[in-house]
Image (cartoon, coloured by chain):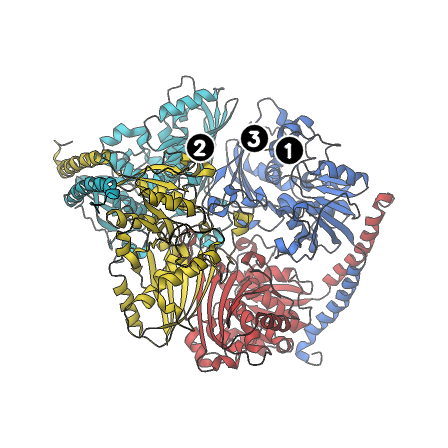
Chain colours: A red, B yellow, C cyan, D blue
Amino acid sequence: MENNPEFSNISACLNIYSFYDNRLKAMEKTKKVTASIIGASGYSGAELVGLLLKHPGVVIEEIYAHTQAGKHFSELYPAISCDKTFQAYSGQSDSDIYFLALPHGEALQIVPNLIAAGKTVIDLSGDFRLKSISEHKKFYGGQKREGEFLQYGMPELFRDHIIGSKAISNPGCYATSIILGLAPLFRGSVKGLSVDSVNVTAVSGISGAGRSSKTELSFSEMSGNVRAYKVGAHQHTPEIMQALGSSVENPGFRFVFTPMIAPYVRGIYSVLNVQLSSNVAMDSIHALYHDFYRSAPFVRLRDGVTEVRHVAHTNFCDISLAWENNGSLVIVTAIDNLVKGAAGQAVQNMNLMLGFDETTALL
Amino acid sequence: MENNPEFSNISACLNIYSFYDNRLKAMEKTKKVTASIIGASGYSGAELVGLLLKHPGVVIEEIYAHTQAGKHFSELYPAISCDKTFQAYSGQSDSDIYFLALPHGEALQIVPNLIAAGKTVIDLSGDFRLKSISEHKKFYGGQKREGEFLQYGMPELFRDHIIGSKAISNPGCYATSIILGLAPLFRGSVKGLSVDSVNVTAVSGISGAGRSSKTELSFSEMSGNVRAYKVGAHQHTPEIMQALGSSVENPGFRFVFTPMIAPYVRGIYSVLNVQLSSNVAMDSIHALYHDFYRSAPFVRLRDGVTEVRHVAHTNFCDISLAWENNGSLVIVTAIDNLVKGAAGQAVQNMNLMLGFDETTALL
Amino acid sequence: MENNPEFSNISACLNIYSFYDNRLKAMEKTKKVTASIIGASGYSGAELVGLLLKHPGVVIEEIYAHTQAGKHFSELYPAISCDKTFQAYSGQSDSDIYFLALPHGEALQIVPNLIAAGKTVIDLSGDFRLKSISEHKKFYGGQKREGEFLQYGMPELFRDHIIGSKAISNPGCYATSIILGLAPLFRGSVKGLSVDSVNVTAVSGISGAGRSSKTELSFSEMSGNVRAYKVGAHQHTPEIMQALGSSVENPGFRFVFTPMIAPYVRGIYSVLNVQLSSNVAMDSIHALYHDFYRSAPFVRLRDGVTEVRHVAHTNFCDISLAWENNGSLVIVTAIDNLVKGAAGQAVQNMNLMLGFDETTALL
Amino acid sequence: MENNPEFSNISACLNIYSFYDNRLKAMEKTKKVTASIIGASGYSGAELVGLLLKHPGVVIEEIYAHTQAGKHFSELYPAISCDKTFQAYSGQSDSDIYFLALPHGEALQIVPNLIAAGKTVIDLSGDFRLKSISEHKKFYGGQKREGEFLQYGMPELFRDHIIGSKAISNPGCYATSIILGLAPLFRGSVKGLSVDSVNVTAVSGISGAGRSSKTELSFSEMSGNVRAYKVGAHQHTPEIMQALGSSVENPGFRFVFTPMIAPYVRGIYSVLNVQLSSNVAMDSIHALYHDFYRSAPFVRLRDGVTEVRHVAHTNFCDISLAWENNGSLVIVTAIDNLVKGAAGQAVQNMNLMLGFDETTALL
C-alpha cells in the first residue's frame, strides 16, 4: 500500500497511529487499577460493567451477585462484552476499588469492612447518604447503620471533597436530577435570592424500578400507562434537602416531590416549579447557572426545552430555564437515570478520587 | 332446542330477548337523531364516529374532512366499522346535530352559520371557549371571532346550562383534566377555603398532538422520549382560569402549567400541586370532593393513586387526593384525552342537550 | 323544548326513542341468560367481562379467580365497569352458561362436571381441543383428560356444529390467525389445489403471555426487544393440523411454525409462506377466499397489506393475499389475540350456541 | 496521596497510567486519518459520527447534509458530543476517507468523483451494490449508474477483497442479517448440501425507515402496530441473491422475503425458514457455522434463541440455529440495523481497508 502515492497520506497517519497504538497496547498490559462490582446483575451494576470496560486505566476483576452466582454475565446482558462470571460475595477485598450497586440495606455491613481494609469504595445505594440517623431510619427502615454517612458524591457540588475521599456515597437518580436543577438557587452566590417553595414532578423510565419481576412493571401493564407513586414520601427527599443546604430550614419553606413512571426505559425528566420570595430577572438567573456550572463538564444549560432523548445513554445533566414570571420559575432537567443517575456518576467520582481525567470513559 | 328440558331456562330467556330484540330493531328503523361530523379524519373526529355508532338514538349522516375527501373512513380507521366516505364540507345543514372537530380557527365561520340554520352544535375546538376576546387573540391568534363564545360544555360544572343549550363549546383535553381536579376547591362550598397557588405538570399521550406528519412526533424520535412544551404558555390556561371562577383573580394567586408528552398514545395524567392559604383537614377535602361530584357519573374519586391505564378508552375522569401536609395538596387526575378530553365529553354533552341519558354510549 | 319549532325534528326523534328506550329498559329488567366466568382475572377473562357487559341478552352472575378471591374486579381492571368481586370457584353451577379462561390443565376437571350439570360451556384453554390423546399429552403434559375433546369453536369453519353444541372448545390465539389464513386452501373447493409446505412466522403482542410477573416480560426487558420462542414446538401446531383436515397428512407435507413476541400489547400478525404443488392464478385464489368467507361477518379480505392496528380491539380477522409467484404465496393475517383470538370468539360462539345474532356485542 | 501507604497500589497504577496517558494524548495531537460524512443528518449518518468519535485513529473533518446545512449537529442529536456544523456538499475532497449515507440515487454522481480524486470511499446506499444493471434498474429505478458496482463490504464473506479495496459498497441492513444467517449453507464447504427454498420473515425497528415525517411512521400510528410491506419485492432481495453465490441459480430454488416493521426503534430480527434437499444432521450444521465464522469477531453463534436486545447498540450479528427436522431448518438472526446493518459495518470495513484492528471503536 505504501508504494502507492495515493495512499501516502493515510499511510503516514497509520504509521504514527501504529507506533502509538503499540505503546498503548503495552501500557494496557501493565498494571491497571483493579475494580470489582458488588451487585453487578442489576441495571446499574451492568451499566457500570459496560462503562468500566471502556476505561483505559481500570480493569474489572470480579463481578458479584449472589442471586446469579455461577451464571455468565453475558447470559443476562449479551449486549455488553464482559466475559466474567457472577460470584457470591463473601468478604473479598483484593481489588483496588469496590463499587456497590446493592438494594438498600445490603451495603450497611460491607462498606465499613472494605474501608477498614483500606479499599477505595463507591456505594450506589442510599445506605450512607443521609447525615441524620433519624431521617435514615424514617426513609430506609430499621437496620442500624454501622459507621458514619459518607461523602456525598456529586462532583458539581463537592468536587474538592471527592478528590480527597476514599469512600463515597453516590447520589440517587431523582436526587441528581433535582439537586442539579436547584443548586445554583440554593448554593449560588446571588445576594438576597431566597426560595419560598419548590414543587417537583419527575418522570422516570421504568429501569429506575430495577430488574424486576413485579406484575405491575410488566410490559402489558405499563405500556400506555403513567402512574405516580410515593407522592410526597420518596426517600430521595431528605437527600435533596441535605444537599441544598441550610436555607431549606427556613420556616415556611415548602418542598413537595411527586415521582412517577412512564412507558420508556431510561431517563428522568424533572419539572421544578420554584417560587422565589421576590422577583429576579431571568438574565440574572441565567448568569447564576452559567457561573455555577462553568467548570462542570457534564452539566449543559440548554436553550429551548431539553428532552430525555438528548441525554439517554450519556452522563449529561441537561438544564433548561424554561419559564419565569414575577418570581415563579419553571426549570426542567433531564438525565439518564442509569448513567448520570447511577453508574456514570460513580465512574465520574472514581475518576476524581483516583486522579483520572473527570470525563474518562464518559464522553 | 325448546323440547330439551336442559335448555328450558335459556330458552325462556331467549324468547323474552327475541321479543324485545325485534321491537328494538323496529325502533332502530324509525327515525333517529341525525348527526354529522365536520373534521372526522383526525383522532377526535374518528373517536366520535366510533362512539356515535354505539348510540341507539343517533345515526351518523355525513362525515366531512376536506383533506381526505373521497376516501373511505375505513381506509384511515379500519378498526372502526363505519362505511361512510369523507366529504368536503361546503355549508350543508341537513342533519339535526353537528359536531366540529377542526383545527383551531376553522370553526370560526361554520359555527355561526349552523346556529343560524337552527342546528344543534358541539364545537370541539378552542374557537368559542374564551369569553375574553383579548385572551382569545393572545392564545389563538389573529382571526376575528364571529359571534359570542358558547356555553362551556363541562357537565360536571354546568349541567343545567348545557341541558338548555343548542350550541356548546367542548372543553380542551388538558383543561378537562385540570379543571375537574381543581373545581371543588374553587367552586365548592367550604367556607374560608382559599387557594394561594397551583402548579400543574401534566403528561399527555402523543395522540394529543393530532394525526401528524411531524418528524418530532415520529416513532423513532418519541420512543423513549419525554419533552415539555409551551411551558407557562399553553392555550388551555385561560380556559382553566375562566372555568375556575372569580377567585383566580385574587391578587397574589399564582397558576403555572407545564404540559409534556411521553411515549404512549392515549391519556392525560395531571399532577396538581395546590397551596392553600391555610391548613384544611384532609377529611374535609375528601368530603368536599365527594359532595361536589356526588351526581357526576364519570368522575371517580379513587383511593390510592390512579393510573392512565385505569381510564384509557373510557369517559372517566379519575381523581386521587394523593397527599396533604399543612395546606399543601397533591391531587392527581387521569382521563383519556380522546374520550373524556374530547369525543366522549362531546357525546355526554349531546346526551344532555337532546334528552338522552347522560351515559348513553359511554359506559 | 317541544314548543320551539326549531326543536321539532329532534323532539319527534326523541319521542320515538324515548318510547322504545323505556321498553328496552323494561326488557333489561326481565330475565336474561346468566353467565359466569371461571378464571376472570387474566387478560382473556377480563376481556370477556368487558364484552359480556355490552351484551343486551346476557347478565354476568359470578366471576371466579382463586388467586384474586375477595378482590373487586375494578381493583385489577378499573377501565371496565364491572362491580363484581372475584370468588374462589368450588363447583357452583347456578348460571346458564360458563366460560372458562384458565391456564391449561385447570379446566380438565371442571368442564365435565359442568356438562354433567346440563350447563352450556365454553372453554378457552387448550384442554379439550385435541382429538388425539397422544398429541394432547405431548403438548400439554401429563394430566389425564377426563372425557372427550369438545367441538372446536371456530365459527368460520364449523358454524353448523357450533349452533347445535352445548360445549365448545374455543380456539387458541395463534391457531385462529393461522387456520383462518390457510383454511380456504385446505378445506376449500378448488379442484387439484394441493399444498406442499407452509412456513409460518407469527408475531404476538405481549398480552399473549398472560398477566405475568416474569422478569423476561417486564417493560424494561421487552421494550425495544423481539424474541422467538418454542420454535417448531408450539402447542397450537397440532390444533392447526387438526383444523386444516386430512390433507396435512399427505406424505411430504411440511409445516413449520415460529412464534415470537414484540413490544406491543395486543394483536397477532401472521406471515404464512405457502408453497403450492402447482401454480394457481392469483385470481383463483382471491375467488376461493371470497367464496369461502362470503358469510363470515368477522373475516375481512383486505387489499394492500393489513396491519395490527386495523384489528386491535375488534373481533375481525383480516386476511391479505399479499404476494404470489409461480405457486409460492405469502398470506398475511391479523387479529386481536384477546378478542378474535380469545374472548371475542368465545362470545361469537355463545351467540351461535344460544341463538343470538352472531355479531351481538362484537360490532 | 502517595505518602499514604494505603494508596501505594493505586498510586503505582496511576503513575504508569499517567505516563502512557500523556503519550497517548501526544499521539492524539499527531495527524490522524481525516474522515468526512456525506449525509450525516440521517440515523445511519449520525451513528457513524458517534462511532468515529470513539475511534483513536480517525478524526471527523466535515459533516454534510444539504437539508440541514447551517445547523449544528447537536441540534439534531444532542446525545452525541460532536461540535460540527452541517455543510452542504459541493464536491469537496479534502479528507482521507468519505462515508456516504445518502438516500438511494444521490451517491451515483458523487462516488465516481471521489474515487477519481483518489479518496477512500464507503457508500452506505444501494447505489453500487448490484452487479446486474438490469436488477439495479428494476429495484432502484431509472437513474443510470456511472461506473461499476463496488466491492461488497461484508467482512465475514469478503475480508480479503475489502482489505485491498479503496471503495466499498456497504451492505443493506436486512441483507446483512439474512446473508450472514444463510451464507454457511450456500458458501460453506459441506459436500452435497443443497438448499431448495428459503422463506424469510424479518422484523425491523422503525429507525430502518430513516428520519421521517410520514404520518404512517408517527408514534400514534405505529405504537401497538405491526405491518409488512414490499412483500416479495424488497430491494435487498437481489443483493442477497448476489452474495449467496451461484447456487441460487439452480432451477427450482425459491426465495421469498417478507419485511415488516414493529414498534421499536433499533434492530432487525430475521426468521429464516430453510428447506434443504436432503436431511443433514444438526451437528453438521452447527459445525459448518462454527467453522465458517471462526475468525469473524462480530458473529456470535448463540445457544437458545437470540433476542434483539442482545445486539442493540452493538456491531454483533447473533445467529441461532433454532430448529431442525428432516431437512427443514429454522435459523434466527439479530443485528442492530444502524450498527452492524449500517454504520458499524462501515467502520468495520474502514478498519480493514486502512489497516486498523477490525474491532477498533466497535467493542
- Name the subunit of mark 3: D
Q: Residue D233, labelled with which disc? A: 3
Residue toward you, B247 or B275: B247
Q: Are marks 1 and 2 on the same chain?
A: no
**Badge nearest the viewer, 3 or 1:** 3
Which residue does the image show at 40% across and 35% down from the upper left?
Answer: C177
Judge the density around disc 1: few (<14), some (14-19), many (≥20) Cα neighbours within 10 Å: many
Work out how far the residue at label 3 is from the one at label 1, CA to CA, in angstroms.
Answer: 12 Å
- Name the subunit of mark 1: D
Q: Is residue D64 left or right of residue A9?
A: left
Amino acid tagged 2: Gly
Q: Position of residue B186 (x, y in %)?
A: 34, 67
Location of mark 1 (residue): D239
Q: Position of residue C49 (x, y in %)?
A: 28, 47
Residue D250 occupies quadrant: top right
Q: Residue D54, labelled with which disc? A: none
Q: Secondary structure at mark 1?
A: helix
Q: Position of residue D175 (x, y in %)?
A: 61, 37
Which residue does the image show at 56% across and 56% down from the upper left?
Answer: A309
Q: Return the disc, 3 or 1, that comes first in the chain's sequence.
A: 3
Residue D23 occupies quadrant: bottom right
Q: Position of residue A232 (x, y in %)?
A: 41, 70
Location of mark 2 (residue): B70
